[in-house]
Image: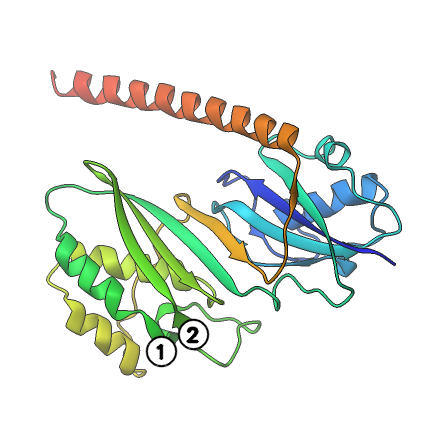
Amino acid sequence: MPRYALRLAYIPDNSYSGFNHQLHDTTNIFTVVCKALHKARLIQSENRVTFASRTDRGVGALNQVIAFDSINSPIIPEINSYLPAGIQIIGKTNVFDEFNPRKDALLRTYSYFLVINDAYDLEQMKHSFNALKGTHDFRNFAKFDSTNPKNTMKTITETSILQLDENILQLRISSPSFLWQQVRRIIGHLIEVATTELTVSDTIILLNDHSTRNKPPSAPPEVLVLEKIVYRDLVFDVDHKSVKFFQNVLVEAVKRYQERSAVNMFILESLSKY
């Protein structure tokens, strides 16, 4: 039976519980996508669908990947007709029989967007971010449950801080794989380093002292995006109409955000006159 991989994108939305295979959770993005695949006569059960990366509630994605076997070839516009506007399939490809989007991923990249002010020490933040590169035990930067792997050794291959605007940073981090909430706790620690008396020395302690209880807080998820997943010799056929539709959805989302920001600013400025 032919095997297919689909690339999908979704906007940050707290009304969904995240992207993960959870039984009886109808608010999970994975479940919503599987229902669309079933309606499109591509699968019989979501148990046969595998995916690349778990994302928490509120996290967005530009490059989530799922895979499944089907006797029918996926038609992207048909699948998208069964999906909410904020969740869209944007590409597809044929894959080999044993392809697993999680295990076969060579690299994952996340981006976190952060609003800063003059109180942020960006040099200290950069030093700490750089100290995380390489192979380390990241148990102090992860949340644990019964499904978490026992091996907490992970390799960070790239870290970067891009200044998009006077007060907006994009923090990018890449690794073959991450622990649960590892990215958010790394960002939480970097925020502490930039705004408190913590330094790169404290970062190194967290990497080496496994008895400490002073673990970093988890940064808010709504400004985290699963940006990219890299595979060997895997090229997706992009559905440009679906990409255009999703771009329009994002334009409307930005417009609504700007309108809400204008309301908040009006109230803030009005209160200052009281």
Q: In this view, does 212 lie to the left or right of 175?
A: left
Mark linked to residue 65: none
Residue at coordinates 75% horizontally, 68% vertically from top-left? 98
Residue 209 higher or lower than 60, as above or below: below
Q: Mark 2 points at which residue?
A: 154
Residue 243 higher or lower than 236, as above or below: above
Residue at coordinates 47% horizontally, 45% vertically from top-left? 58
Q: x, y percentage for residue 168?
A: 25, 39
Residue type for callout 2: Lys
- Quarter of the image with the C terminus is top left
Farthest-out residue, front: 233
- Quarter of the image with the N terminus is bottom right
In this orientation, which residue lies closer to the viewer: 170 or 189? Answer: 170
Which of pointers 2 and 1 lies earlier in the amino acid sequence? 1
Q: In this view, does 84 lie to the left or right of 2?
A: left
Mark linked to residue 136: 1
Q: Is residue 56 left or right of residue 194?
A: right
Give the quadrant of residue 39: top right
Residue type for callout 1: His
Q: Can residue 49 be seen from the camera position used here? A: yes
Measured in 3D between alpha carbons, the distance from the residue under mark 2 to the one under mark 1, in whole angstroms, is 6 Å
Residue at coordinates 67% horizontally, 53% vertically from top-left? 66
Give the quadrant of residue 125: bottom left
Residue at coordinates 78% horizontally, 37% vertically from top-left? 75
Q: In this view, does 163 lie to the left or right of 60?
A: left
In this orientation, which residue lies closer to the viewer: 43 or 166? Answer: 166
